[in-house]
Amino acid sequence: VASWVSALFGRTEAALAVAIVITATIFSLASPYFLTAPNLVDLLEAYSVTTILAAGVFVVLVSGGIDVSFTATASATQYLAAYLVTTQILPPVPALALAAALGIMMGAVNALLTHFLRVASIIITIATSSIYYALLIYITDAQEIYNLPDWWSNRLSFFRYETADGDIVKVTLPIVVMVVVLGLTHYLMNHTRIGRQVYALGGNPEGAARIGIGILRVQIFAYGHLGLLAAVAGFIQAGRVHQAVPTALNGQELNVLAVAILGGASLVGGVGSTGGVVLGVLFLAMLQNGLNLLGVSSYFFGVVIGLAILTSVGMTSFAERHARRRRVRRAE
Amino acid sequence: MIVDPAPEIATMQRTVSTALDRIVADLRRGKVGTQGLLIVLAMLVVAFSLRMPSTFPRLTTLQAMMFQLPELGLLSLAMAIPLIAGGINLAVIATANAAGLLMAWILTALMPAETVGGTEVLWLLAALAAGLALCIVVGALTGLMVARLRVHPILVTLGTMTLLHGLSIYFTRGRTLSGFPDLLLHVSNDTVLGVPISFILFVVVAGFVHVLLTRTALGLRIHMMGSNLESTRYSGVDTSRVLVLVYVLSSVLCFLASVVMMARFNSAGADIAGFYLLITILAAILGGIDPYGGFGRIGGLFVALWVLQTVASGFNLMNISPQLALASWGFILLLVMAAKRVAAAWQSRPRG
């Protein structure tokens, strides 16, 4: 049994999957509405922005870095796109492209500073996030942009379906974008050279440098990728709330980090998977939704996330120690 | 009568040039420490004084700064100790707010409205004791988890931060509590010889932490652990015990910060001062504390706090948006990091 347990908990993803199945079973027994298509689709849409951001953060974590400036990037790019579109300086496509380019650039700045100043990325991104946010609020005077065009704020749905009881299930743009982002990130990280180089860099920076991997190039990829996804998330978020706000995602950075870490991405780098990110988001989303359906106060949710993080940290530590003990025993 | 300024200018020039020589010498040795930061501070003070000769170089400005500095100062101290020990405490703000709320709840909901005199003092002491006890428990549990689980404190304290913030939100439903006894408000609003009591508290606490870190066995162990946890363990130090003490100390500093914040804002809430979290790390690193642990002086942090406060107050007097002050804090951190990088490159340059 011990080896079975450690095999199961050795991979955070597997442990999470089990936890998800257990919670889903409990909630669906307790509330018949829980496992219905409309509820699950609403859940997916509500968590689309978090998932897109977590997919970006996960790549930076795998590279051995950390970034807390991506919410500033998301807010800045969202605002730039909204400004360009509402003032009709640029048509939609170039405006979004320009905002995406800004996102990539803001990410690349983090990579360049981390690389050339040789300072921990958490310090660099704390500095850049305060600069980005402060300049954004200063330049925009903290003014919201309300009059987003219809194509942006009307929820585009790709698929519509009415259930027997008259509930409408809509697969909307945020869900589609989220799936595409996850798919592309998965492909990039597992089936391209640069993706594997990110794992190599995070797993062993010295070794990666010795075998001739261009460290700066990989870092620019990881942070630039996060910058781009931050721009995408900012765009989706503005559409969901029908306005662009300079402080749109302020304070969300640690929550997104928690999701990526819950999903198995390691802070020391080299470990993590897109599947883990999905499971992490799914677990938190299900907990929140299930507790809601059971009538637990939504104010209680922070407590639940905190306990989930601490439990997952405890389990990972337990699994690692068990695995180490087993290796020692085998060696003897 | 006109005094010939020449000799004084000559003396000044000599002082400046010796100071410059010393700085260049330090830079050559790859040292950009507290002196570098002191120069930044001096330049800021001179620049603001030249720009606003009638408003900036005034005692009232200094007093205003002394009123504002302690809360960020105490929270930065709470962040600095775990950083020196090779850890981090992301829960500093959440701990301070949770303690503040507990004390506020005792003072507003439990204490009868007409309490005066000696009974009021007793209630206040009881509230303070409860807040302190909560912080000690939080710190001890955090320390135990960090020691037993052997995972990075970022993860543990991310969890405790979320949990404490969640509990604060749950019990208050996101509301703030306000209306405290005047006795408590005196802590922040009274002055002794013009110096705010909260500032005196901060200086005394900072001095205490400095002595603790540099002159005691515990302080030495904290530094050792920050350099190399495993070799500290092998040299016979009970690292678990030291870790627990590190996080208890950090949490007790959060308690002091929460008392100062309660008194200053006359309110307590789950989301007060949330944006300070990253600023405390910024201040500690600007003050020369190594984010990877092992190195750092409280004196450096003290100067760094003055630099940040001078920028904030100067910009405020010039009617420049506080947002730009925040942005320049970020720039100053990057500049100091760049200066250190250049100094290190200069030191390790090929010599022929």
Image: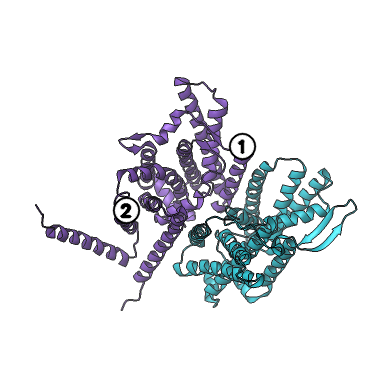
Q: Position of residue B319 (x, y in %)?
A: 41, 52
The chain drawn cyan is chain what? A
Task: Name the quadrant of the C terminus of chain A.
Answer: bottom right
Q: Position of residue A202 (x, y in %)?
A: 57, 67
Residue drawn where x is 73% and y is 60% of the image: A154
Q: Is residue B330 left or right of residue A68?
A: left
Residue drawn where x is 38% and y is 65% of the image: B339
Front one among B249 and B183 = B183
Query: Which residue bears the numbered disc 2?
Result: B52
> Outermost residue toward the left?
B1
Mark 1 is on which residue type? Thr
Tell me if mark 1 has few (under 14), some (14-19) or many (20+) residues whose alpha carbon lies within 10 angstroms of its own: some
Query: Which residue bears the numbered disc 1?
Result: B172
Secondary structure at badge 2 equals loop
Q: Is residue B343 left or right of residue A92?
A: left
- Badge 2 or badge 1: first in the primary sequence: 2
